[in-house]
Amino acid sequence: MKKIDKLRKSNTFKGLLYIFPATLILIVFKIYPIIKSFTMSFYTDFDYLSGEVYKRGLDNFQYVLRDPDFYLALKNTFYFVLGAVPLSIILSLGFALLLNSNIKLNSFFRSIYFLPFVTSTAALAIIWRWIFNGDYGLANYMVLLLGGKKIKWLTDPSFTIPILVLFNVWKGMGYKIIIFLAGLQNIDKKYYLSAKIDGASKWNIFTNITLPLLSPTLFFVSITSVIGAFKIFDEVFVLYNTGTGPLKSGLTIVYYIFNKFYRHWQFSISAAAAFVLFIIILIFTLIQLKIGKTKSNY
Amino acid sequence: MNKQLLSLFLVLILSLGLVGCKSNPVTPVDNNEKVDNAEEVKEDGILTEITNPTEVVFWHAMSGSNEEALTNLANKFMDENPNIKINLQFQGNYRELFEKLMAAAKANQLPTMTQIYSNRLSWYIEKGLVENLNPYMENEKVGLSKEELADYPALFLDDGIWNGNQYAMPFNKSQMVLYYNVDMFKEAGIEVPKTWEEWKSAAEKLTKDTDGDGEPDVYGIVFANNISTDIAPWLKQAGGMTMNEDTNELYFDTPETAEAIEFLNGLIQSKVARTAGEDKYANVPLSQGRAAMCVASTSAISTIEKDTLEGVNLFAAPLPGHKTNDQLYYGTNVAVYNTATPEEKLGAWLFSKFLSTPENTAYLAQETGYLPARYSAREIPEYKAYLESAPIKAVGLESFDIGFQGTRNIGGINALDVLGEELDLVFAKEKSIPEALKDAQERGTRALEEARKN
């Protein structure tokens, strides 16, 4: 018994040793900044350089929660999440199913879809800016061909979120397709064969076999997509020339935080806003976890 | 799982976090202990001679031909001062430079000297991080003579003075001017506008909608996208101003501001003027013949000349005036941080001074689109000859005496950003001018107050 205990002890120690480097990095670059920015969100009067705090309080949260800009950022971000998450999941699941059905040039298509994901957002955004340029863009060329009138894609505030949704869906699809493909290939072929013997239709097979057995993957993708979508920033930043789009129509929560920090040097307000964003994401993730527990088959 | 070990580990994490929390206050360093090898430390605390090799780190945002000119100047300086090494460090564009400076200030790793706008420098001055250059300037050995000082246009020196102390020396200066398409003016038979009224009627005459779709193909005037950042000349010309540097008061909701905004908005609503929009910079449509005039900095001249399509003839003029004829000058200065050693600070001062000698400032002006920071620079034969071959570069030299530089309030940028947001709403016809200005005043004042809290 003692021997086993000893062995276990040394194993635990070894394990801790293994994760030590990664933990150290996490602590220094993730956990410490998180704690620091959380405490910073309570500073109401302080010296940024010396770190001296003269007054603490809830003023920053009050400021954020009363700032119409913050609500605008919330609204824009919610629209974006509502548009981007379902659309990207449905589309990438659809493409994954197609690619899984052994069509010709399978791996070629897979690479094609994956390309936008590995290209830098900045480079992609420049291309998109050209496509949607109001004067000589490809999109407007098509519109004119079809007999329409020039559309101000990038300068009309009502197009901002739809374009961001499209951009984000297109960019992230390759990654999600790969995840879905992995999930699909993990499903035992036996189920499909027996379903075929029973004479199940394609739709029946999809809803009764594929979907339930894919639910862990679906669950993972939906959680990461929601979190990712809430954090949207770089797409706006580059697509709208480091601005927030026409009439702030592309002001998202992270952009709000960025602006407060880097442009306006309101460090503690920015920290408070970041904390509010954290709470929002946490709530959504908890809801998803709850749903996931009851719905998914492990 | 071994609970003891686990709790030990958690304690370790916690203590690591706590150690990290203990911050090192950034205090202006008194480097007296480091100067044991110095020749002499004067009563006013400055060195006047460098005997040991000293490195001066200079952060800047000059790229392309600007950077080349700066590098040449630095090399020339190092040839003349073999003990001083100027380490030029490019930090990206202005905004990136200022972000990095802020982070460096927090980390107590500020460079010896930097290129910086005065409205950014005021924060560092309030934090006591900037070296007062007066002792150097007034020093017999390393300073400037009365004649030399008088040779600096007052507006450039003033831009570096806070409470009577010189915290920055002029570096790359430029003026906000009106660029125009010479041929379009000739064709229409009109003169370059000198007043707001002439400007408006010129814009009306030069705006053209050739395909008749209601959207002009040639706009009369194009303004920069963030028109509020440099809104000051129009407010001044209408008899007002953006804000008060001493009382920190905003003047957004005043009849003068309203007059200026009404003028600008009138141009935009009647579709004879627009902001740059997707063109990003106001000079782009002008260079491509899609606009007759644009408002931009003289520093853009080299880019404009490079990008202008063949057959498009451009020239520049001072901004049209109204009640007054105030002209906006902008551009950065160089400042020295007091976190450096006395030798480094002296080296930085010598380099600051070197950058604005008549020869060197003329050289910089010749190689870039910037203006020389000295009156006598235009007497330098090479520069004189150069101006004759490139008369557009002489435009910015005309208005030094009616020129001014922007306000430097801490948080002033934030307040002007708020004004910009409200103006965008006005231009998009979502808000009336009185309403927008009232909101801008209220929100801007709050932004100014907020900015002072850290």
Image (spheres, coloured by chain):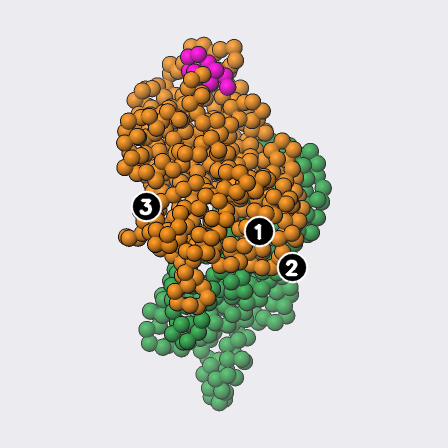
Residue depth check, mark 3 versus mark 2: number of the one nearer the observer = 3
- Hey, what amino acid is under mark 3? Glu
Chain B's colour is: orange
Query: Is residue A281 something that shows in the picture?
Result: no
What secondary structure is marked by label 3?
Answer: helix
Q: Which residue is mark 3?
A: B305
User: Does the residue at mark 2 contact the one at mark 1 (Cβ under 8 Å)?
Assistant: no
Q: Residue at left 57%, top 71%?
A: A297
On whether residue B136 falls in the magenta region, the answer is yes
Residue located at (55% from left, 75% from top)? A212
Q: Which mark is residue A283?
A: 2
Q: Give the quadrant of residue B10.
A: top right
Question: Circle 3: is it few (<14), some (14-19), or many (20+) Cα within 10 Å?
Answer: few
Inspect the magenta stretch and tell me whether residue B56 lies in it: no
- Which mark is first along the chain, 3 or 1? 1
| A134 relative to B263 in the view: left or right | left
In-front residue for pair A132/B372: B372
Q: Residue at x 47, y 64 (%)?
A: A152
Q: Residue A30 at what x, y percent from top left?
A: 55, 46
